[in-house]
Amino acid sequence: MKNTLHRLGAGTAVAALIATATSAGTAFAAPNTEVLLLSVSADDIEAASEALGDLDIVSAEGDNVIVLGDQDLADELEKTGASVTAENYADSLGARPASAQPAAPAPVPAKLNAADYDTFFNGYRTTGAYAQFAKDLASQYPELVQHVDYGDTFLKQQGQGGHDLVAVRITADVADQPEYADGQDGKPRFFLGAQTHSREIITSEMAWRFATELIDGYGTDAQITSLLDSTEVWVSFQHNPDSIDVVEQAFADGVDTTPAGDGNPNSASKAWQRKNQNTAGFEETGAPWSRSQPGIDLNRNWPYGWGGASTSSDPSSVLYKGTAPASEPEVAALKDLLEDLYGTYDVETTTAAPDERAGTYIHLHSYSDLILYPYGFDNTANLPNADALIAGAFRQSFGNDYATGAPGDVLYNASGGDFDYAYGKLGVPGYVYEIGTAGEGGFFPGFQRADDYWQKVQPGLRFAAEAAYEPYTASLGGVVSELTAERQDDGSIIVTGTATDDAYGQDAGSAERRPAVTQIDDVEIQAAVDRTALDAGESTGPGEAAVPEAGETVDFEATIAKEGSEQARFVFARARNGSGEYGPWQAVFVDPVEEDEAPEPTDEPSPDPEPTADPTATPTGDPSADPSEDPTSEPTDEPRDDDDSSRDQDRDDRSQLPRTGAGLWPLAAGAALLAAGGLGVWVSRRRS
């Protein structure tokens, strides 16, 4: 089969790869165990790939691609006439020093602070720790988390140990939700997956932190509370646990580290394991493990676009596609789960998904500092919902300035990927993050880098999750970047904030794909009991005002009258830009009105001179309930503002929305909340 190359326009990252393989069993010289990063120009890579077969391209620099290899591969590339510049993988590591602070223990939700999870490589959690963490989340937070076993790994199916394939379903009142196999009929769903390539160890850590942030934030962070009230968030921490065991064992056996603390395994180390543990057809080639290993590449095994660019038919290749689409149990099980969650909708290259189709899928990989949208199999293929998919990707790269585009735009075309299937066959936006660079630790960053990585990844994940209820419209709209609300003594609410359309990733190499910045011409504000009431349309009249003077960034302010908003505990805002669409809702807490209490009248005075409880004040249901508990009493928690001090200063204004407003109200207030709705207001704005 012919190898393929996609050549980019001048000034952008190039792409090449590599459809087929050399025959299994080809003899190689005894490997030099030093891993190299080989820079090869786009003008040379096509001939080289024709001669040598599949290459493990890990990043791009200007018009060159960077190939993971060794001295033997460098020699073979030069024999094809390619101009090769080699750099030791170890020398590239740590070019960007990690934080001077020692590695902090990874965060866990508050109820799990006493839990002890096994780690490797100075802080990364083991497969056993992830399995236990998923169970602990469900047992300690049953109101928010459901543990879902959605299949078995290859080794478990073969009776050779292996693992369950596990996800957690995170949403408010999760036990009361319908079965998740309801496609588009349930709550909108955001799915985050990680570590389908086992060597990409930072990715599951990011998924762990995402789940932890959501669980800890429910009830104390207005935006997270709104998200989980309205959306199901699914997290699959480790998609390839059989092979992650192999990587962990390699570190246990000993892996060199750099002075910066990054892992630097030699080329023979099984720490380079990328594929699953299906060894069918594998033959030793004499090449090092970093270039030749058993298994199927799970990110080349998905049905849509299977067998095209950047896949191999050689079981020894790191890009082996498998014997058939979805041949691997890890892929087949996740495919079935996603079809349950989203239903199917054939978009492919001809039919746009409807605006009302809900849901978003993201999978985390490393490395290259990229956010990718479909299509991976061919970046020139028609993308029916291109405007929304591209806008969503650039909104996600706003907090980190990752290069943004289809894989063939920024790195290389790659077929058989999960995000192509999510969009092409399920009709929901699919994205891939490639996290980090060689200078920030490559495939094995020291754990002390995890905090810095999280600051870059978190804002994009939050945007995608918050837009998942209407991804094809909300991704196109404006962004409310600041929002505050304060209840006044007269019961009204003063709302102020800022809305902008200038919130797209700024990577220079992605400029030709970046959406144009338009003007914000409207901001809608709602006061409501909660997000459920807002989505149900329980409002006394939402207001959408014409902007006296539109701008790319505008300040807004409004006063919400007391009448109709007495029981409101949230204020929501969203902005409309030149697309004509509104962006995602942003939320802040606000205190409900504290009503004056008065004793309830009785038909007869009590004959008992001693003080007694008024029987009419005792709630029905629980006879032991304290009659003094008033569901409309003022909350005891003070408003909590999120601390953004840990963010890099140059990213403070772009990484996430401020989380402001009142704190968590007492649970006893639930009965009072059910009676209230929302209040829409007209908004005045001024140009910033």
Image: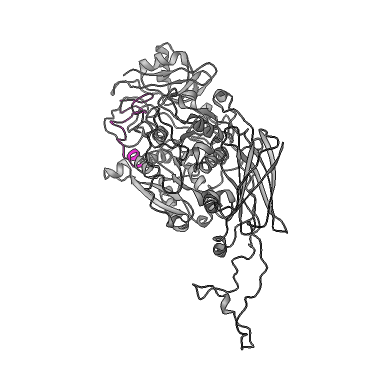
Query: Which sits in the foreground, 398 or 527?
Result: 527
Q: Position of residue 111 (x, y in %)?
A: 51, 57
Q: Is residue 181 visible?
A: yes
Residue 401 occupies quadrant: top right
Q: Is residue 375 magenta?
A: no
Q: Position of residue 649 (x, y in %)?
A: 66, 37
Say left or right for 503 vs 256.
right
Q: Is residue 321 magenta?
A: yes
Label tally: 0
Q: Residue at x 62, y 75 (%)?
A: 600
Query: Which sits in the foreground, 35 or 292?
Result: 292
Query: Which sits in the foreground, 40 or 152?
Result: 152
Q: Residue at x 28, y 28 (%)?
A: 283
* Quadrant where the image shows the C terminus: top right
Q: Position of residue 505 (x, y in %)?
A: 58, 31
Q: Residue at x 49, y 36 (%)?
A: 472
Which residue is most to the top? 81
Q: Residue at x 55, y 62 (%)?
A: 670
Q: Main secondary structure of the magenta part?
A: loop
Q: Is residue 285 above or below residue 345?
A: above
Q: Is residue 441 visible?
A: no
Magenta residues span 305-333
Residue 604 occupies quadrant: bottom right
Q: Position of residue 421 (x, y in %)?
A: 39, 34
Residue 374 occupies quadrant: top left
